[in-house]
Amino acid sequence: MRFGKISLAAIAAASLAAAPVAAQSANSASAVERAAVENSEESNLGGSGTIIAILAAAAIIAGIIIAAGNDDDEPASP
């Protein structure tokens, strides 16, 4: 019984290790290349990175205030 579990684990490990190699060899056999596309338009998301950073900082500060603002020292049971 123990030998069966060990051999099953070895087979699973070998298949997990061999899967990327098999996928790479199958992909290189077809020799498909990606074509580049020219894009002359600019992104419409100008400055959104700073907005996201400000919102993330505000959310972190709000979480700290909510976590630290619990001044209820009374017991829950009467």
Image (cartoon, rainbow, N blue to C red):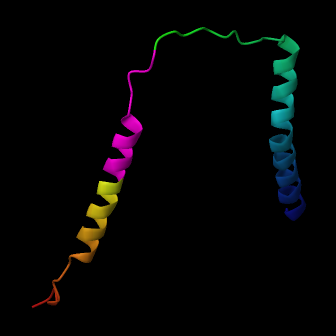
Q: Nearer the viewer, residue 53 or 17?
A: 53
How many callouts does the rendering have? 0
Query: In the picture provided, is 38 more to the left or to the right than 77?
Result: right
Residue 2 falls in image quadrant: bottom right
**Whole-percent x, y for residue 44 in the image:** 38, 21
Residue 65 falls in image quadrant: bottom left
Q: Main secondary structure of the magenta part?
A: helix
Q: Is residue 42 above or below residue 52?
A: above
Q: Nearer the viewer, residue 53 or 34?
A: 53
Question: What residue do we see at 87% from left, 45% from top?
Answer: 14
Quarter placement of the N terminus: bottom right
Question: What residue do we see at 45% from left, 17% from top?
Answer: 42
Question: What residue do we see at 83% from left, 49% from top?
Answer: 13
**Whole-percent x, y for residue 19 in the image:** 81, 35
Q: Is residue 22 above or below residue 3?
A: above
Q: In the image, which residues are magenta? A: 42-56
**Whole-percent x, y for residue 31 in the image:** 84, 12
Q: Nearer the viewer, residue 23 or 51?
A: 51
Query: In the picture provided, is 21 more to the left or to the right than 36?
Result: right
**Whole-percent x, y for residue 16 in the image:** 80, 43
Question: What residue do we see at 86% from left, 38% from top?
Answer: 18
Residue 36 falls in image quadrant: top right
Residue 49 among those drawn in magenta: yes
Q: Is residue 27 above or below residue 16?
A: above
Quarter placement of the C terminus: bottom left
